[in-house]
Image: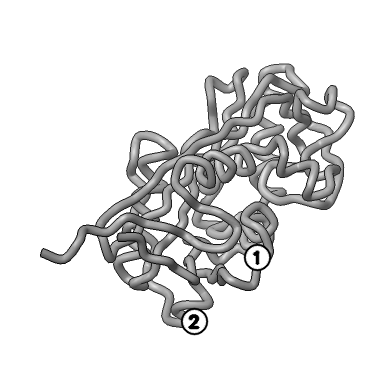
Amino acid sequence: MLKEFKKIMLATSSDGKLREFKELLGNEDDIELVTIKDVFGDNAPAEPEENGKSFADNALIKAKYYSELSKLPCLADDSGMCVDALDGFPGLISKRFCITAENPNPTDEDHNMELIKMLHKKGLTESRAYYECALVLYNAEVNYYYTASGKCYGQYKDQGSGSNGFSFDRYFWPDEYGYNFSLADLVDADKNKISHRGLAVKEMKENMKLNKTYVLIEEKENE
C-alpha cells in the first residue's frame, strides 16, 4: 500500500535552506516542512558525525539519524563547492574547513575569504569549479530511503556579487549565464532551474515520487 505523509523534517536549522527547499518543493498548504529547531526546540540532539566518503554518504547519515529520532520522514542534503585549481577542495568539508579554536562558528564570508586566499596563493583570481548536492529522503518507519543528486558548473571568483543566496553563492558564477551573474544575483525562480540543489530536488521529485503535495512511500502489506 502507499502511505501519505503531510510533514517532512529537513535536516537543517538554516533559514536559508528552509526557504530554498520550500521554493523548490512548492509552497503547498498540504505539506509542512519543518526544521530541526521546529521539532526539537532548544533540545536539539547533537549532530551526527559526517564521516562518509561522499556527499551521498553524509546525506544518508543525517537523514537516517534525524528520521529515527523525530519519527518523521527526513530530507537531508549534503553539498559543497569543489574548486578545480585546489584539487576539488573544499568538497566534503565545505561547511567546516576553516573552523578553528579561535573561530568555532565561521560565517559564509569567512569560508569564502579563506578559499579566495588559497587561490591567491596560487596566483589565481578564479578557477573552474562546481557545486554538488546529494539528497536523501529517509523514512525510519519503513526503513526505506530515496536518493538524488545534482551539479552546477561554473567559475569560482574572488569577485562577489548579489545578496540572494548563502554559502558560496556570491562568488560562484554559473556557466548558464555566461559568468555575468553570480548565483546570489539570481532571483529564486532562475536560480532553482540551474542550481545543484534545484537539479537534485527535480530528480527526487521524478524518481522518488516526491511532489508538491505529499510523499508516497511504499509499505509492506500486513501478513
Question: Would you name the residue on which mark 2 appears?
Answer: 41
- Image position of 209 with respect to 70: above or below: above
The one of 22 and 49 positioned closer to us in this rendering: 22
- For the residue labelled by badge 1, is the local secondary structure a helix, a strand or a loop? helix
- Image position of 47 with respect to 165: above or below: below
Residue 179 falls in image quadrant: top right
Q: Which sits earlier in the primary sequence, circle 1 or circle 2?
A: 1
Q: Where is the C terminus found, in terms of image quarters? A: bottom left
Q: Mark 2 is on which residue type?
A: Gly
**Crowdedness near tag 1: few (<14), some (14–19) or many (≥20) residues, C-alpha within 10 Å:** few
Is 50 on the left-hand or right-hand side of 32?
Answer: left
Q: Position of residue 122 (x, y in %)?
A: 67, 18
Cα–Cα gap, marks 1 and 2: 14 Å
> Mark 1 touching mark 2, by CB under 8 A?
no
Q: Position of residue 158 (x, y in %)?
A: 79, 31
Q: Where is the N terminus found, in terms of image quarters? A: bottom left
Residue 53 falls in image quadrant: top left
- Image position of 157 with respect to 133: above or below: above
Residue 219 falls in image quadrant: bottom left
Q: Position of residue 91 (x, y in %)?
A: 51, 34
Q: Mark 1 is on which residue type?
A: Asp
Question: Would you name the residue on which mark 1 appears?
Answer: 15
Residue plotted at (76% across, 36% down): 171
Is 139 on the left-hand or right-hand side of 222?
Answer: right
